[in-house]
Image (cartoon, rainbow, N blue to C red):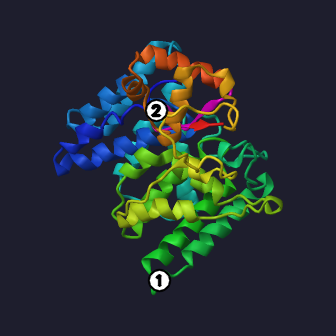
Amino acid sequence: MDDIKKDPFEEYIKNLPPSKKEIGQAWSAAIGLQDVDGLKTSEYLHATAKKNIDGEITIDEAGDLINSYYEGKNGRVEHETEEADKVSQRITKLLSDKSFVFSPAQYISIHKELFRGIYSHAGKLRDYNITKKEWVLDGDTVLYGYAIDLKETLDYDFSQERDFHYNGLSMQEVITHLARFVSRLWQIHVFGEGNTRTTAVFFIKYLRQLGFDVDNDLFAEHSWYFRNALVRANYNNIKKGIYETTEYLELFLQNLLLDQKNELHNREMHVSGRFSRKQDIDPIKQDIDPINDPIKYKDLNEREKKIVGLLREEPTLTRSKMAEILGCSDATIKRALQSMVQKNIICRIGSNKKGEWIIN
């Protein structure tokens, strides 16, 4: 139940000269993209990245240092952290490389480069069918591509995009089309693991080929939103009146490509709609009615009730900020949050760094 930690490069990058800012943004995006699989990078990776940004070492030397670091650990570090560090360096290298070919082979080669030595199936199409329980779908799954049809489906989607003509379209029409393309590419899910990270890297490079000056910061800050938007773009439940929509993905792309300032909140994508409504209450001064309120407040103490009120108003509120508002210690807030999670009053979506609290 850690605080939402700030991007380790956020302040650092702001003060960089233009010649170094691009590589700094690539590192920031690479680290942020680990959030989509709940992975956290190490402090060693952050220190190594800064050496590369400052020009003390090359990106390849950064990769060598990271590999040596984990060889010396002899398995004493969590495998997930090792994956996050190595893949972050590889994403940074790919995003810094201007070469690109729009093809299924390029897409597959990106997966191979990112996950070589990490997954035995790096660069290989999955040969089994998959389902994934999604929080944003209330536990349901997207219908992913059938294993036996993956190659043909991938080739078809690429051929359709290759033959598409953007001339004459408004920017909003371009964004709508791009949202449909990337959501369909992601939904095929040709890779067993690492699909979203591979798709994001490929998509960034494709956008650059199309002439867009893509700022990687948005992927660093909202990678979990990007993934959930892809999920909603590929989910139908007609019985419940839920239809696939690219509207959330389009909001993301409007911010990315047009520098708009749409607010991006994971809770607003939940298919039930119950997490997008805010209550008009003062979380500190107004007592919460334990009878009329839908949550079982009878199981909460007074501090926990106030925390729920705070989270209703601001789901991304940090632990330290809660402690400041309520006049108690950080450790006290941590215990309260853990207690409420165990009682199934609240849950966490996204990563510790970029996620938010949801009231069940």
* 56 horizontally vs 202: left or right: left
Judging by the rendered image, the residue that carries numbered circle 2 is 285
Residue 355 among those drawn in magenta: yes
Identity, as a three-letter code, of the amino acid under mark 1? Leu
- The front one of 220 and 3 is 3
Residue 208 visible in the snapshot: no
**How far apart are labels 2 and 1 at the CA level?**
52 Å
In the rendered image, the residue lying farthest to the bottom is 168
Earlier in the chain: of badge 2 and badge 1, it is 1
Residue 313 visible in the snapshot: yes
Residue 15 appears at what percent x and percent y?
A: 18, 42
The numbered dot on residue 220 is: none
Residue shown at 79% from the left, 47% from the top: 129
Residue shown at 29% from the left, 45% from the top: 23
Determine whether 145 is above or below 54 in the image. Answer: below
* 309 horizontally vs 244: left or right: left
* 330 horizontally vs 9: left or right: right
Tell me the quarter of the image containing the C terminus: top right
Residue 50 among those drawn in magenta: no
- The front one of 74 and 5 is 5
Q: Residues within 10 Å of mark 1 (few under 14, many from 20)?
A: few
Q: Secondary structure at mark 1?
A: loop
The answer to which image quadrant residue 232 occupies is bottom right
Per the rendered image, the range of residues in magenta is 344-357
Identity, as a three-letter code, of the amino acid under mark 2? Lys
Residue 269 appears at what percent x and percent y?
A: 60, 53
The numbered dot on residue 169 is: 1
Determine whether 223 is above or below 238 in the image. Answer: above
